[in-house]
Image: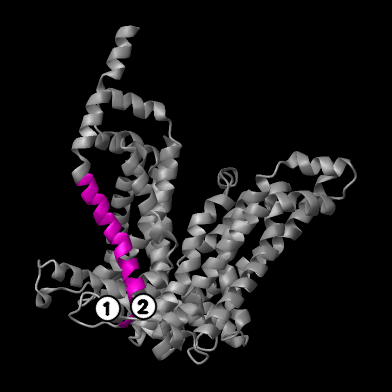
């Protein structure tokens, strides 16, 4: 017994020395990775505060916030685009949750015929490249006078966000202990009462996570808005694209930064909302 | 327990609105795309297909190569990253990598397009930094704003996604086999390739399939980084519609993009079927 113990323990010190020895290449690789990830992001920050920057200067020649004033001036268009974007995203979340909460509850709790088939049907839109779909949707919307309207854009964003909302919503309801709502039912609550007072509050963190996710997807969506909304519904991504295409890199970078901030913030809080027990039930 | 039939009915009522949205906003446009590809002035025919072939066969090949190359690089880098996250023995380096790799995950594609456009340009920050080290003269720099920019953008954005899924799958593997092989003296590369990777192959294929669908859906990145011919068929689709209102050719290109993603899905399905039979 003691012999085998020694044999097992023997490689450990050798490994420790090996690690010290190889820190240099590891450091270089991690440094290169950090450059590949933060280089472009730093570049964005520099452009956002650059007053003038041209060849052959490595860094901006002068810094300042005059472009910020220009972007957020009443005629700069950014405030309008921001309000449109946030409005569209909020409506998309409302519509997606209105569809996903009943659907998620039914998929998680009720005996459904063809349950697997229904889950699959809700997943299929994500298995196809959506550009050809949006192109034809725009054509249909044009005939229905929905092209260039906020409602049209909200519908497109919902068709994209619904999949996530339903799948995460189903997982959120599945993670709630069924016995709690059964208990509420035995003390006299109706099915709807039990849903409203027990299931819904307990599933709320997961639903909130899906809401944030749908909100961000809508905020960042470009392709669908480009075909269905432009030029009447001008969201931040469209503003960014037009500014960049026109060579206004400061304006494009400031818009990009406004889009980036909520996404990065979400990255840091997502784990707090999406608990492991919910994550484990996604797609089940 | 209430009787079964009404419960079934209630479930279907609750789920109907969501399904209706999928039918109206996805299935109908999808049918339109398929029909539209073969609709010509003289009824249904293959006119759009031959026109697309004449105009865009080079761009279709270009798209295929870009997607294949990107998927290959994404798979390679993600396997290395997730492998290191799982098998790495230095806690500090693993923690650093775990903190680093996720950042691009939540950066929207439109923002990726914009930051790489300014970063990779001939006079962009990357070349400026290389020039300032004295390695290259300002006149000899090369811009990456062509197919390379598109590949870099796809890899930059998708590696964190695939790594996240792979590292998750690897973390839930049975540590016993891994430790046993390690104690028998297997190197970490062999551990990764022969023990860990085969067990998470289906996760890798799912993640790659989703990545290919994403890459075939993104209009902003090729539009911003590589707008000139040869370019991705996503750009061509937008061009056919905005410039000519030519839905026929655009829809044929749409079918081509379905075919490319279908090919990846087919490879994945074949692999899982084989695994299930075994």
Percent position (x, y) of residue A253?
Answer: 38, 77
Instruction: Indicate the quadrant where residue A167 lies.
Output: bottom right
Q: Note whether A270 is above or below B37 in the view shown.
A: above
Percent position (x, y) of residue A168?
Answer: 60, 54
Q: Note whether A41 is above or below B93 in the view shown.
A: below
Q: Would residue A111 appear left or right of A20 to someone viewing this image?
A: right
**Observer-nearest residue: A41 or A4?**
A41
**Observer-nearest residue: B3 or A98?**
A98
Name the residue carrying label 1: A60
Percent position (x, y) of residue B189?
Answer: 25, 37
**Residue at image point 45% right, 86% down:** A69
Cα distance, mark 1 to mark 2?
Answer: 9 Å
In this rendering, do the residues under marks 1 and 2 share a single chain? Answer: yes
Q: Would residue B177 appear left or right of A179 to someone viewing this image?
A: left
Span shown in magenta: A25-51
Percent position (x, y) of residue A243?
Answer: 39, 85
Q: Image quadrant for the C terminus of chain B?
A: top left
């Amino acid at each position: 017994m003691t012999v085998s113990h020694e044999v097992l323990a023997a490689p450990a010190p050798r490994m420790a020395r090996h690690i010290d020895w190889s820190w240099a290449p590891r450091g270089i690789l991690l440094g290169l990775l950090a450059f590949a990830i933060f280089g472009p992001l730093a570049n964005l920050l520099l452009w956002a505060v650059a007053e003038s920057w041209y060849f052959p200067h490595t860094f901006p020649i002068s810094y300042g916030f005059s472009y910020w004033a220009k972007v957020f001036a009443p005629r700069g268009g950014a405030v309008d685009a921001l309000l449109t974007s946030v409005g569209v995203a909020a409506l998309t979340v409302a519509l997606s949750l209105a569809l996903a909460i009943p659907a998620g509850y039914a998929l998680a709790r009720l005996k459904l015929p063809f349950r697997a088939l229904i889950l699959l049907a809700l997943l299929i839109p994500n298995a196809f490249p959506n550009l050809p779909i949006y192109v034809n949707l725009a054509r249909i919307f044009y005939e229905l006078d929905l092209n260039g309207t906020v409602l049209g854009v909200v519908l497109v964003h919902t068709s994209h966000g619904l999949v996530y909302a339903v799948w995460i919503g189903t997982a959120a309801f599945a993670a709630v202990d069924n016995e709690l709502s059964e208990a509420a039912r035995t003390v006299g609550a109706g099915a709807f009462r039990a849903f409203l007072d027990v299931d819904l509050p307990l599933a709320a963190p997961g639903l909130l996570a899906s809401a944030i996710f749908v909100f961000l997807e809508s905020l960042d969506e470009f392709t669908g808005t480009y075909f269905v909304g432009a030029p009447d519904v001008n969201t931040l991504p469209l503003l960014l694209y037009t500014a960049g295409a026109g060579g206004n890199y400061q304006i494009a970078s400031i818009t990009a930064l406004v889009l980036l901030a909520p996404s990065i913030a979400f990255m840091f809080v997502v784990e707090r909302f999406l608990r492991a027990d919910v994550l484990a039930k996604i797609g089940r | 327990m209430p009787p079964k039939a009404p419960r079934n009915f209630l479930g279907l009522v609750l789920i109907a609105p969501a399904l209706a949205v999928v039918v109206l906003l996805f299935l109908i446009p999808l049918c339109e795309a398929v029909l539209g590809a073969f609709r010509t002035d003289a009824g249904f025919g293959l006119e759009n297909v031959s026109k697309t072939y004449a105009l865009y066969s080079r761009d279709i090949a270009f798209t295929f190569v870009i997607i294949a190359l990107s998927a290959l690089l994404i798979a390679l880098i993600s396997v290395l990253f997730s492998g290191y996250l799982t098998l790495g023995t230095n806690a500090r380096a693993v923690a650093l990598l775990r903190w680093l790799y996720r950042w691009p995950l939540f950066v929207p594609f439109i923002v990726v397009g914009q930051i790489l456009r300014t970063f990779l340009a001939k006079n962009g920050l990357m070349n400026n930094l290389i020039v300032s080290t004295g390695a290259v003269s300002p006149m000899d720099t090369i811009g990456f704003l062509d197919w390379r920019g598109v590949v870099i953008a796809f890899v930059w954005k998708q590696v964190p996604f695939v790594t996240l899924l792979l590292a998750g799958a690897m973390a839930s593997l049975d540590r016993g086999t891994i430790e046993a092989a390690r104690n028998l003296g297997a190197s970490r590369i062999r551990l990764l390739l022969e023990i860990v990777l085969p067990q998470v192959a289906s996760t890798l294929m799912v993640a790659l399939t989703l990545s290919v669908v994403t890459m075939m859906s993104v209009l902003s990145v090729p539009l911003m980084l590589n707008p000139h011919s040869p370019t991705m068929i996503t750009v061509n689709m937008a061009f056919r519609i905005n410039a000519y209102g030519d839905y026929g050719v655009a829809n044929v290109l749409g079918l081509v993009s379905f075919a490319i993603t279908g090919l990846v899905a087919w490879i994945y399905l074949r692999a899982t079927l084989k695994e299930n039979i075994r």
